[in-house]
Amino acid sequence: MDWHGVCFRWLLMRAGISFVGRWRRPDLPYHRAMPSATLPSLHDTRRGSLSCVGLGMTLGSHLTPLARSHIEQADVVFAALSDPIAEEWLKRMHPDVRSLQPNYAEGKPRIKTYREWVALMMAELRAGKRVCGVFYGHPGIFAWSPHKVIEQARAEGYEAHMEPGISAEDCLYADLGFDPGRYGCQHFEASQLLYCERRIDTAGYLVLWQVGVVGNRSVGRFDHGPAYRALLVERLEQDYLSDHEVIVYRGATLPIERARIRRITLRELAVAPLTAEETVVLPPAVTLQPNRAMLDRLQALDSRGQEATAA
Amino acid sequence: MTDTIELLEAIGGDASLRYAQAGELKGVLEQVQASAGLSMAVELGDGAPLRHELGLQKISETPQMNSPGHGDEEEEEADVPLPEPSQPDRSPTPPAKQALSY
């Protein structure tokens, strides 16, 4: 240990902070050789606080140390997860885990359920509790309640924080093996393509979320599901050929599962069996076209720069 | 019998087990006396037997987001520009605002 290390350790010991681990040992792998410290947690006991964290997609694989800490240090934990086994896992981390699932009801608009979730979390927060909302994947992606409850909590003067998690989108890039930076990538909630005028760039990837429940706003009411999906396909056929490849993807939620990947045509998408958790990806349909005008201007700038350097 | 949830957590966090072949993983689980449901789930690559064994119902509703533009009560939360017939200019709201301020 060098002199700085000795001083740092002395300061920590003086502050009453002890080391559980040991200083770096060259004979151990890096992650095992680094010291791990136990520090006292800081909690403002005067007021409640809120954190919304992501559990990641796969049980045991994706939970970040910081998200776990939020869960463990909370007074009460609310859970909106995609698998009951993940909920059981969460219960091992905290004795007071309250599932938000029972707020769904047949025929009830989802937005009503999501508002109730916000109200439940806010009630505990106003009671002075440290509240943690745990959502599958990333709490801020395709989730209304976490953003809303944080906004409301902050408006009422509470400390509120979102902790990112590994999302379905993250898993998708890894499992399907494409980089969104290469050709660009657009993401849409599928219903939005029906409700709103949107422009699709077919030179990049198109990722559509919640295609399995397109047009469906209430739990259980889905009489027109296939007809809605047919409309979505019709909308996509404005930009793609009907035999364009469509990838149907679902990431693994349990570590004993593999990602599910099916390849069909756009035409088949209208009738293919699809669950709410599956995501639809359309690969690029056209090659990138060079922007000649901008390339010429860049060339001119380069030439000017070279002339200035030569002079 | 080893606790199933603990075993799942261990598999999920172990680089050699997470992507192991089903046969190999089953062998490891036999050594630690894993439950029949977990072994079956590994064999099928599907959590259904496990949920059955643990007495858990499959979650019927995955939390989702509501897309703006439904035209019903959640409209107040959305930023979708409402049609304004008196204005011929239909330039859209910046995409970032439509998507992110929800």
Image (tube, coloured by chain):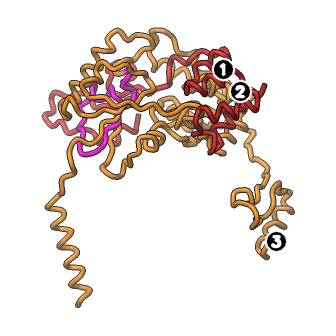
Q: Are marks 3 and 1 in contact (CB under 8 Å)?
A: no
What residue did someone put label 2 on? B4
Q: Quadrant of the C terminus of chain B?
A: top left
Answer above or below: position of B74 versus A303.
above
Q: Are marks 2 and 1 in contact (CB under 8 Å)?
A: yes
The disc placed on residue B37 is: 1
In-image side of A83 versus B74 (left or right): right
Amino acid of disc 3: Val
> Residue at horizontal 48%, vertical 33%?
A259
Q: Colour of chain B?
A: red
Cα distance between the residues tagged 3 and 1 = 53 Å
Q: Dot 1 lies on which element?
A: helix
| Chain assignment, label 1 | B
In-image side of B26 versus B72 (left or right): right
Q: Position of residue A122 (x, y in %)?
A: 60, 28
Q: Position of residue A194 (x, y in %)?
A: 27, 25
In-image side of A155 versus B90 (left or right): right
Answer above or below: position of A184 versus A295.
above
> Which of the two discs, 2 and 1, labels the residue nearer the N terminus?
2
Q: Dot 3 lies on which element?
A: helix
What residue did someone put label 3 on? A6
